[in-house]
Image (spheres, rainbow, N blue to C red):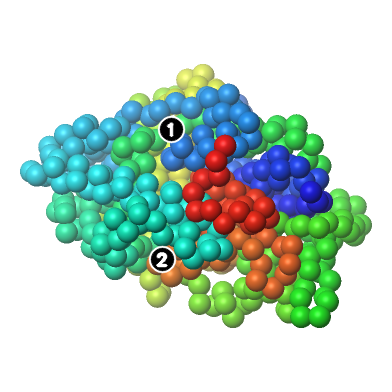
Amino acid sequence: MSRAIVIGGGIAGLATSALLARDGHEVTLIERNTHLGGRAGNIEEQGFRFDTGPSWLLMRDVYDHFFELLGTSTDEQLDLRLLDPGYQVFSEPDGASGPHSITVPHGVDAVAELFESIEPGGGAAVRKYLRSAGLTADVARNRFLYNPFTRLASAFGRDVLRSFPLLIRLLSSSLEKFVDQRFTHPVLRRILAYPAVFLGTDPKRAPAIYHLLSAFDLDQGVFYPMGGFWAVVERLETLVRSAGVRVITSAEVTEVVTEEGGRRVTARGVRWTDTDGKSRVDHADLVVSAADLHHTETELLPPRARSYPESWWSRIDSGPGAIIALLGIEGTVPELGHHSLFFAEEWEENLQAIFGADTTIPDPASFYLCKPSATDPAVAPDGCENLFVLIPVPPDVEIGAGGSDGGGAPAVEAAVDSAVERISVWAGIDDLRSRIRVRKTIGPADFARDFHSWKGGMLGPSHTLRQSAFLRAQNQSQRVDGLYFAGAGTAPGIGVPMCLISAELVAKRIRGDHSAGPTPV
């Protein structure tokens, strides 16, 4: 075994550190912020506890497998609650009937009943859709998500060959087209197409293979970890420290130290700056960067050592940025469930504003709202509610940063004001604005400052066809021996489950494991 340094203490960095320590490596984890967790952060104020990043827990099987690799289980580490219903969808109210929402239940039978009630024939259509999504999800798990793609043959097997005609159709069509051919009601179409936004792309550009995501939220179900995603971070940190990982926070890595020998470059450690401004060097046999991939490649490596230089990034599509509002509400808001999606009638215009050629903050915007206090009373004072509002926007640091009590950049605060007004009108909460006790906002400039996020994006490179699977940036440097990458910027992609898998892909590459599926426990 060897000495390993992991840069970045977000979900991917924590997961990688835990797996490498489990394999017997001597691991040091270096994080620039005062706390671990990265985008999965936490803010506490006046008795409110806000998650600042992920809030949907899907793909429970990925968590189950990851914790099993560490000799434990999800049930031992987390208190997960299955949400039923999974979420609400709000549409613009009309003058006659007032607020209008659809409650999306858990389970195929209940979902089919809902779809049939909205669109005749929709029940049978969504059953067929979810069967296809489940089959595709199984193939993806066994052949693509956990595959380091170090052996071409590993991507092929009887399951792939049996599904080959379906996979070809799914890869040659967009998710939007695939959905629109099967459903006509606009809200049903948006329920099935919106996951593309959480993959960082427009449903017009996401390949239809990503309809597999509907197998997770509509069939397997949406979960919530009691304590929020901060509880996930806390458990990972405990596992990392108990495995003997040396953890250093408030330490800015300024360079991946490399050594040149002949035609090859080798990683030898990292240079970092402590809280006193003193430069230090830690030597290692392996370096894993779980920091932003663009920052790692263009700032921490010399030009000759860059697998993904600036010229490569000029051809890459970024996922969206985000404006986030953390709102502490006086009194209860029973009109809102745990998760809510607010879909503007200007859906297409929204997507073009975020992903099109001439980007701007959508107005009016579609957005996502989480009320964790619906399930977890510990996140808000008695009789109060905790609201997390996420507004997708272009990845543009010029939009600005957030602040407290309306003190953020004008564009950030205006977008939040508009969202609060829309929640008030669409959900029928007339006095919502006057009941806001705590208001904190986060903008793209905050993502860039706190996480070196490329363009200020909240997710990383989007999941278009040419930025998925083996076409996405992989987990090992092409130019530097002993340098590996984990996190949303690399394979397999965006989201907490993908970050856990990326850690396993790094471990596989270090072990010389070329297998396609999850590592046998």
User: What residue lies at 62% left-to-right and 73% top-to-bottom?
Assistant: 308
As drawn, 259 above or below 144: below
Q: Quadrant of residue 15?
A: top right
Measured as percent of width and height from the top left, residue 114 is found at: 18, 36
Q: Amino acid at mark 2?
A: Thr
Q: Residue lying furthest left in this view?
A: 120
Q: Quadrant of residue 358?
A: bottom left
Between residues 49 and 136, which one lies in front from this camera angle?
136
Q: Which mark is residue 223?
A: 1
Question: Is disc 2 placed on a helix, strand or loop?
Answer: loop
Specify whether 206 is left or right of 490: left
Is any atom of residue 400 visible in this view?
Answer: no
Q: Amino acid at mark 1?
A: Phe
User: What residue lies at 61% left-to-right and 45% top-to-bottom?
Assistant: 11
Is any atom of residue 131 visible in this view?
Answer: yes
As drawn, 360 above or below 4: below
Measured as percent of width and height from the top left, residue 349 is found at: 30, 64
Residue on which the image places disc 2: 464
Between residues 363 and 202, which one lies in front from this camera angle?
202
Measured as percent of width and height from the top left, residue 58 is found at: 43, 40
Question: Is disc 1 placed on a helix, strand or loop?
Answer: strand
Q: Gap in Å between the C-alphas at discs 2 and 1?
A: 27 Å
